[in-house]
Amino acid sequence: MTNKWINSQVFWQKRRVCVTGGNGFLGSRVVEKLQQREAKAIFVPVEKDYDLVQPENIKRLLDDAQPDIIIHLAAQVGGIGANRLRPAEFFYNNLMMGVPLFHEAWKKGIEKFVAIGTVCAYPKFTPIPFMEENLWDGYPEETNAPYGLAKKMLLVQSQTYREQYGFNSVFLLPVNLYGPGDNFDLETSHVIPALIRKCIEAKERGESHIVAWGDGSPTREFLYVDDAAEGILLAAERLNDSQPVNLGSSYEISIKDLLELIVNLTGFEGEIIWDTTKPNGQPRRKLDTSRAEKLFGFKAKTNFKEGLQKTIALYK
């Protein structure tokens, strides 16, 4: 299948790449894989030097990095709690990091812009599995709609700049990520690291129970972080089209079953109490991932249970 595509190392050896958010959970894996591919030059801006919410820093970044390709991973992210607490921040900061950076990249004549969206851009009630053509069929789930919509504007930008200016960019929609090195801060983390930390700490303290949000009925799909990084680089190398593309594993699990699996893998023996005063979030999430496989040969490789075991082992 891959023989119709350029060799990864050949592609990157001739190109300078800027990875915003390259020190983060996903970004560090993308940088690692770029190094394995012997990328010619990798520029990773640090937030204290280049706060991308400020437009003047964007121009300075492009002057300093001189990239051929930008992979835009920098984002303000968090779980339901953080999104509910700071919806305006999540909207403004993500919009202002993405849209002006994209515009300045076009003005500078950069070869390609790889924009990373989010599964939160999908309507609250999307038919399962989520197909890219359903993206505009309704308003996103309320708790993370401001974040989801800010990131979705990069899709509009990708399509309009390609149509009017012929600017080459791609827009990817990764599902929830997990893996070693995730954010385990209970205030801002996503569901897997939050549940792992709760179980391990409760076990260490000898507590009789843990409290989980909602009723456990929603389903989620998770993508191992290394698989996501590989998908992003394959799209950078092989995709030259502005249609949105899902990145996922196609494996769906309920939050209840997920927690039972984490309880089992961490050895926590207490009771689970579901706090139904807390929101469930989107009822179901499962992506159709056939477009990514067809357009750039991406298919997730990591078994979910094995990925969880690695994540727990590193956190311990």
Image (cartoon, rainbow, N blue to C red):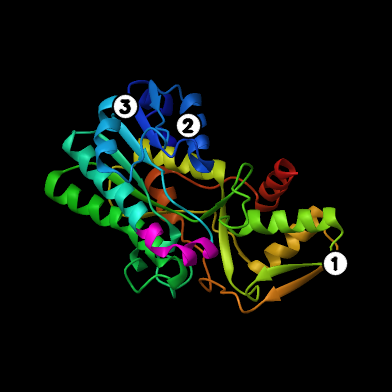
Mark 1 closeness class: few <14, some 14–19, many ≥20 residues within 10 Å: few
Q: Disc 1 marks which amino acid?
A: Ser
Q: Disc 3 marks which amino acid?
A: Ala
- 144 left or right, relative to 57: right
- 286 left or right, relative to 255: left
Residue 297's place in the image compared with 62, above or below, is below
Q: Label 2, label 3: how many angstroms apart (C-alpha)?
A: 15 Å
Give me the residue at 39% from left, 32% from top: 45
The residue carrying mark 2 is: 31
Q: Are marks 2 and 3 in contact (CB under 8 Å)?
A: no
Residue 85's place in the image compared with 292, above or below, is below
Q: Label 1, label 2: how many angstroms apart (C-alpha)?
A: 42 Å
Give the number of the mark in front: 1 or 2.
1
Mark 2 or mark 3: name the one nearer the start of the chain.
2
Residue 13, by quadrant, is top left
Q: Whole-percent x and y of residue 174?
A: 46, 53
Main SS of the magenta part reads: helix
Mark 1 or mark 2: name the one nearer the start of the chain.
2
Residue 149, by quadrant, is bottom left
Report the span colored magenta. Answer: 80-91
The residue carrying mark 3 is: 65
Residue 208 badge: 1
Give the number of the mark in front: 2 or 3.
3
Mark 2 closeness class: few <14, some 14–19, many ≥20 residues within 10 Å: many
Q: Label 3, label 1: how many angstroms apart (C-alpha)?
A: 53 Å
In-front residue for pair 206/155: 206
Name the element at disc 3: helix
- 225 left or right, relative to 161: right
Q: Disc 2 marks which amino acid?
A: Val
Q: Whole-percent x and y of residue 229?
A: 49, 40
